[in-house]
Amino acid sequence: MLVKNYIDFILAPLASATSRVFTALCLLPLTVWGQLEITFPQERAIFQRNLSGNASVSICGNYFQAAQRIEARVIAVKPGEGEETAWTILEQNPSGGIFNGSVKIPQGWYSLQVRAIQSGKTVGIDTLGRVGVGEVFIISGQSNAQGVNDLPGIPLPPGAADDRVNYIAYNNEANNSLNDPPSPLFAHLDIQDNISILGPRGHTAWCWGMLGDSLVKRLNVPVLFINTAWSGTSIQNWLDSSKGLATSSVYSDSYQFPDQMPYANLRIAAQNYARQYGVRSILWMLGESDTYPVRMGYENFKYKLESVINALTIHTGYKIPWMIARTSRIVDNTGSTITSQAIIDAQNAVITDLGDKGAYGPETDNLPVSRIDGTHFYGNEALQVLAGAWNRQLDDAFFDNIAPVPPSDVPVTKLSCSTDDSSVSLRLADGYRSYGWTIANEEGEATATGQTMQVSAPGTYSAIIKDEFGNSLRTQKITIAFPIKPVAPVIQPSGNIQICRDSTVSFFLDSGKDIYQWYSGDGQIVQQAGGVFQPKEAGSFFTKAFNVLGCESDRSNTVSLTIRAADNPPVLVLQGPFNIKVQPVADTASVDYVWLRDSNIIPRQSRNTLIVDSAGIYTAKAAQSFYLDRDTLVCYSASSNSIEIGLRTLSDQYIVYPNPAESASINVLSKTPVENARIMIYDVSGRLIYNWQGTLGPIEKFRLPLKGPGEFIVQITSAASKRTIKVVIR
């Protein structure tokens, strides 16, 4: 049941993809699940598309079983939401149990599949249910960008209806951390409370869920929002904090913003999320507080806004496009709603000066909506108007001409095993200013610094590396799920083994995920891989295990193989009509024989002579015994020549042979022993020339007292029978 639930969980996101793909995954053996792990990207991650409508996406992870290549493909979550890609090689001949590659993915919303291939078979597979290539926006400014909590009687703004509208679930409002944010947790933008934060600081879904739905419907791509806006801020607060200066609220000198805030959230988002996943633009909406109570003039506002933009460029080393809303409307201390043309003009001037890195955002002062408090867009109706204003400015011309910041490749981490196979070295990419490790193993969690780290225990290891500007990239997470040094394998059967030359023996291991290499006794490789080994020659053998990290075990037990060869095929001769005999061999002490009639074994016959009692074709094999330790082995030769015995021969009780004979020596055979038998031999004239009496059989030899050739009569008499046979002597 647990296995079924696991497969249902993995495959559920694919249910709306083609049934062909769903069926193909179901047909994979259960053993391939869990043998590969995708560690980047994360579930629901969205990468910024380029002007051509695609993105180069890094795909990283771990594999736990030997693989010759790693492949990836994407499948649209729903028909029409993307273009399915063919399996593409991420990495050929990966090493160290980790893979890192990139593929070009068309814009869309996808299920991502990654598989490991070994000898043409899938040996590992993992799936992300959601990953996208679309639009990434950083929201910044003050309260009409950040969002505000609900008022009594005013419902919370709705979240996005479309699954493709996403945000980062990270709350930096309480801590105001200046550190790198945690690994992002992407989520559907369906916030419906005053507690959840549209990371790192946004309140409620505000107008962004509505805008996301409009963009997704029109562009047919997923959208990610990152909200760094801060309510009640002046451009002065952003400028001061960008310089690291203390800054206070324009509404109360007693409130001093946390260190480097509000600007730090914007910088951190640009240096982390935008650098890793790319970004289309900053959506900036600020000017209300500088209208009142600051009453800032044109030159002052223009200079300070440009200074903030320039500061972000200096802190990141690259230019992010800015879409700047033209906004100034606010309620003053008399309760009157006021606007500032100076602020609007300054905003327009900044946009113009930005050139292709600037875009005109919505003009919000005169939007046809009633603001309950004179300043904020409370209520669904007002927010729908605001979302529509943003949507109109984010038109086709914007997406066709504003070149985004592309996502970055995940830097390659190299893994190598130490010379004594007791640890592995993890080395991060060259060319970065700082390296910070995060370690989680059985001893707990820890951090470390340095480009290289030595690892001697299972655990998970990842890093954040920073360039000269402070931009951060997360490296792939490396999972070591087993001891660094493999356990020495044990070969079965063990000890000294002997086999016949026409047989084979298989040595096998209680094999797992390691690669096993087999060696002869002198250390020469006799088989590159496999948990089973069939030697072709005699000798001694041992093996070693190599895990995917590249570390090797101590050598296994040694086994010895002796190959025995039986005698050459026996040679049969007929010694009379009822008697077949094997010609003598040099050493017959340990040799028995297997007799066969018409290819069927004759039971209880193992001597070198066979008395036949049935017609048929007779053959024999030599059966030679060999002894090694306590093992006895019987090896069989090839079949002998054949001798055919007919029915006519077997019908006679007595036979005289040879007949004709070349000398005076003849043999008398009886099928069964006969007591009180009498043999009398006469010449053709009737003269008795030989007389013998006794027990006959199965063979008696006689030498006749003859002086020359002739024909003779042999008379055999017993109590039960009498037989006369004519014999010719040449």
Image: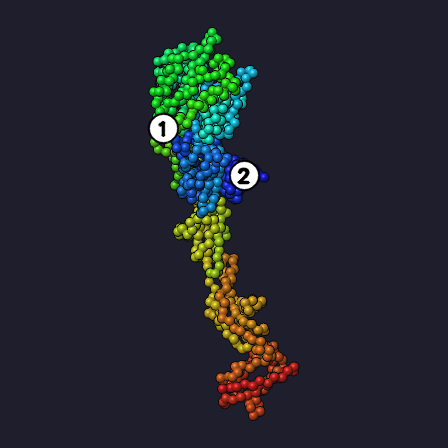
Quarter of the picture holding the N terminus: top right
Q: Is residue 543 above or below residue 326?
A: below
- Residue drawn at 35 percent across, 13 percent down: 299
Q: Is residue 372 visible?
A: yes
- Residue drawn at 42 percent across, 19 percent down: 325
Q: Is residue 457 visible?
A: no
* Label 1 sits on residue: 467
**Residue 312 horizontal/vertical position (percent):** 37, 22
Q: How much space separates mark 1 and mark 2, taking CA atoms?
A: 41 Å
**Residue 578 horizontal/vertical position (percent):** 56, 76
Say which element carries label 1: loop
Q: Is residue 659 above or below residue 588?
A: below
**Residue 246 horizontal/vertical position (percent):** 40, 15
Which quadrant would residue 647 be assigned to in this image? bottom right
Which quadrant would residue 605 be assigned to in this image? bottom right
Q: Is residue 542 above or below residue 60?
A: below
User: In the current view of this chain or complex, which residue is farthest to the right?
Assistant: 720
Which quadrant would residue 135 be assigned to in this image? top left
**Residue 481 horizontal/vertical position (percent):** 48, 38
* Label 2 sits on residue: 7
Q: For the residues labelled 1 and 2, say whether their Cβ atoms are less than 8 Å apart.
A: no
Could you tell me the amino acid type at mark 2?
Ile
Could you tell me the amino acid type at mark 1?
Asp
Q: Residues within 10 Å of mark 1 (few under 14, many from 20)?
A: some
